[in-house]
């Protein structure tokens, strides 16, 4: 596969307005291709695009063009700045694929992400017109921000996230994917470790429950993660959460999750 790094999609955002484009090895100038927007995590205020490269490589090996964007973190701008950046990245990906593959406009897109990136994948996919989204894949994505900001890891973060001292129920509701679901929403795939204490699996459970009530196509895949965080990386500990630590781009996805993701992607092609 080819990786085109630091492509500018939002020039006004400097380094946070760049992304990496993964082109599958069997690239051909004219053929149908699926495209995926793959969004990194980091609690909305850490990490960058290379941290989600392992997921993009998996997608590219399944023949998909992937775009991993940086987006503005909370220290750059409060919500909804990061969400708006991801919507810009989705629009950029559609146009980029049309250039790379003449005669074919990308869409509907696959929108995927993990942790805070899972939240952004959900808000992005649920904000776009349903016909533009093939599906949303959320790995450990928070679906209810009031509930998430009440956990031990995220206490007091709500003010930082929203950029104001007084956070209202309206704020929580309009930034929470579970409140954005409607009968026309795209299919959802929620993957979550039963051992996750950082983003408890109840977030996926609640989202799936509401989606089913609305009659949406939805799947929840619970797995036995290998740590008390998201549990999807082989031989990785919390020390890797520091972006100055190990090379996060070289992490490997544990076998059960890798297999399930490949099955999902195969069903979409």
Image (cartoon, rainbow, N blue to C red):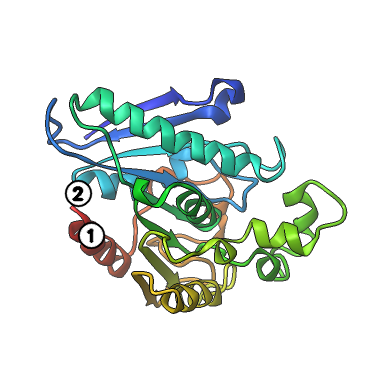
| Left/right of residue 125 with respect to residue 14 in the rendered view | left
Q: Name the quarter where the N terminus is drawn.
A: top left
Residue 32 percent across, percent down from the top left: 15, 38
Residue 247 visible in the displayed image: no
Q: Are marks 2 and 1 in contact (CB under 8 Å)?
A: yes
User: What is the count of numbered marks?
Assistant: 2
Residue 124 percent across, percent down from the top left: 49, 48
Q: Which residue is mark 2?
A: 62
Rendered residue at 37%/62% (across/down): 234
Which of the two residues, 253 or 55, is positioned nearer the viewer here? 55
| Left/right of residue 169 with respect to residue 104 in the rendered view | right
Residue 239 percent across, percent down from the top left: 56, 56
| Left/right of residue 209 with respect to residue 107 in the rendered view | right
Q: In the structure shown, which secondary structural element does the residue marked by tag 1 occupy?
A: helix
Within 10 Å of disc 1 (Cα), the crowding (few <14, some 14-19, many 20+) is some
Up-down relation of residue 49 to residue 124 (above or below): above
Q: In the structure shown, which secondary structural element does the residue marked by tag 2 occupy?
A: loop
Who comes first in sequence, dot 2 or dot 1? 2
Q: Which residue is mark 1?
A: 262
Which of the two residues, 221 or 177, is positioned nearer the viewer here? 177
Rendered residue at 19%/49% (across/down): 62
Between the C-alphas of marks 2 and 1, the distance is: 7 Å
Residue 98 visible in the displayed image: yes
Up-down relation of residue 241 to residue 72 (above or below): below
Rendered residue at 54%/56% (across/down): 119
Q: Which residue in the rendered view is the most extreme toward the right?
A: 165
Which of the two residues, 69 or 85, is positioned nearer the viewer here? 85
Rendered residue at 42%/39% (across/down): 68
| Left/right of residue 107 with respect to residue 209 in the rendered view | left
Residue 175 percent across, percent down from the top left: 64, 56
């Amino acid at each position: 596969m080819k990786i085109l790094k630091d492509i500018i999609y939002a020039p006004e955002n400097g380094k946070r307005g760049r992304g990496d484009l993964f082109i599958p090895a069997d690239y051909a100038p004219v053929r149908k291709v699926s495209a995926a927007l793959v969004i990194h995590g980091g609690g909305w205020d850490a990490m960058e695009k290379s941290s989600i490269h392992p997921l993009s490589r998996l997608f590219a090996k399944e023949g998909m063009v992937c775009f991993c964007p940086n987006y503005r973190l909370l220290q750059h701008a409060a919500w909804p700045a990061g969400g708006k950046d991801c919507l810009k990245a989705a629009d950029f990906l559609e146009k980029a694929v049309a250039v790379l593959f003449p005669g074919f406009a990308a869409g509907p897109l696959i929108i995927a992400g993990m942790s805070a990136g899972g939240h952004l994948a959900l808000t992005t996919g649920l904000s776009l017109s349903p016909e533009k989204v093939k599906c949303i894949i959320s790995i450990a994505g928070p679906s209810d921000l009031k509930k998430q900001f009440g956990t031990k890891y995220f206490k007091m973060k709500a003010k930082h996230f929203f950029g104001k001292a007084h956070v209202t129920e309206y704020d929580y509701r309009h930034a929470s994917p579970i409140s954005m679901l409607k009968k026309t929403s795209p299919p959802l795939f929620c993957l979550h470790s039963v051992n996750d204490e950082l983003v408890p699996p109840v977030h996926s459970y609640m989202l799936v429950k509401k989606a089913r009530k609305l009659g949406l196509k939805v799947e929840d895949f619970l797995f036995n993660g290998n740590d008390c965080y998201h549990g999807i990386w082989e031989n990785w500990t919390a020390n890797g959460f520091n972006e100055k630590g190990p090379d996060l781009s070289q992490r490997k996805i544990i076998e059960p999750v890798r297999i399930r993701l490949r099955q999902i992607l195969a069903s979409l092609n």
